Amino acid sequence: MTSILQALFDGLASGAIYGIIALGLSLQFGVMKIINFAHGSFLMVAMYLTFWATSLLGLHLLAAIPLVVAVLYLVGWGTQRWLIEPVYRKEATREPISVLIFTTGLWIFLDNLFLVLAGPDYRTPAGDWANGVFVLGDLIFTYPQVAGLVVSVLVTLLLVLFMRYTRLGRAIRATGQDREAASVLGIDSAAVYRTSFAIGLAILGVAGALLLAIFPVDPFIGDLFGVRAFIIVVLGGIGSIGGALAGGLMVGLIESLGAQFLPITYSEALIFAIFLAVLYFRPQGLFGVERA
């Protein structure tokens, strides 16, 4: 019974971080109607920025989050403004296929750029906090797991409140539902796209810092989590904020609890089997809303 409870907590903790990795992608996907294939690579960038902030600046891993979030927000805004937006203007369609090709190229470029800059070695954060644990009975809780669970839920809640109760959040939702109608109402869709992309990467700044406490970073770590984020977005429902967190928790629990009863490769196969089943029977996702 103890092993099941431990696996349950481990799955919730890792799943919460998976959820906010997917959260930014879900926001971009829901508003811009494109898949950012470089999402995992931007997560890798966030992890390296966190590593450098802790090793060179001496910051605590959690204290590095605001700095990394600010840098990723600016990178996201600039990427949308000067790299992706011109592609939109040239192709002049709602879902330009050229953007998918461009983000694929950006994914490969970023991976190889950081291979040159940082080398192929695995990096772990400085300090002992990432190795800290506390014990409750027979259960062991690590500091990064608890922080990841709490911070992930908090970030999701803050984004929900932002989207629901702020003028900019409502403009983002309106643009995601109908860009042309939003433009008629005076909403600058280009500005909304820049902000949405920037917020999506800013959330990755949080996820990268939390993930670095659990996984060492290397130039290709984003490939694994980029694919996982796409699976979670589909499971939770494209554009659904709560669905991204719920989908992440689901994947984390399947991964952790499945390992208690099945070989690890089988639990991974189960995740993909559920992903394919959702695509076939409920393409809007488990928590998404079907639109006419």
Image (tube, grey):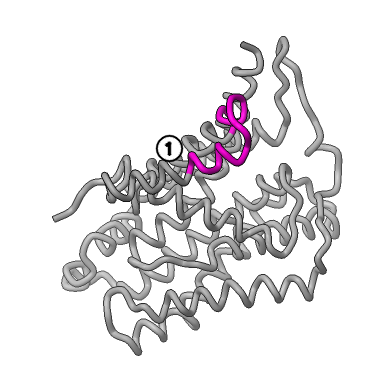
* Image quarter of residue 91: bottom left
Residue 177, located in which quarter of the rendered image? bottom left
Rendered residue at 34%/53% (across/down)? 238
Check disc 1 and give the amino acid type. Ala
- Give the x, y percent position of residue 75: 58, 71
Looking at the rendering, the stretch of residues picked out in magenta corresponds to 256-271
Q: Residue at x 67, y 58 (%)?
A: 221
Q: Position of residue 70 (x, y in %)?
A: 60, 61
Q: Can you see residue 165?
A: no
Residue tagged 1? 246
Image quarter hosting the N terminus: top right
Query: In the image, what residue occupies the spot 16% across and 68% down?
Result: 181
What quarter of the picture does the C terminus occupy?
bottom left
Task: Please say whether residue 260 is one of the residues in the magenta stretch.
Answer: yes
Pointer 1 local density, CA inside 10 Å: few below 14, some 14–19, many at least 20: many
Decide if residue 10 is in sight here.
yes
Dominant secondary structure, magenta: helix
Q: Residue 167: x, y in percent? A: 31, 56
For the image shown, how many numbered marks are present on the structure? 1
SS for tag 1? Answer: helix
User: Is 145 a magenta residue?
Assistant: no
Q: Residue at x 46, y 55 (%)?
A: 230
Question: In the picture shown, does residue 72 fall above or below 288?
Answer: below
Residue 117 place in picture, x, y as percent: 79, 73
In the rendered structure, the answer to whether residue 16 lies left or right of residue 244 reads right
Relative to 170, say whether 135 is above or below. above
| Left or right, residue 126 beside residue 62 | right
**Residue nearest the observer in this picture, 151 or 276:** 276
Relative to 16, 47 lies left or right = right
Give the residue at the far left of this rendering. 292
- Between 37 and 32, the one lying in front of the other is 37
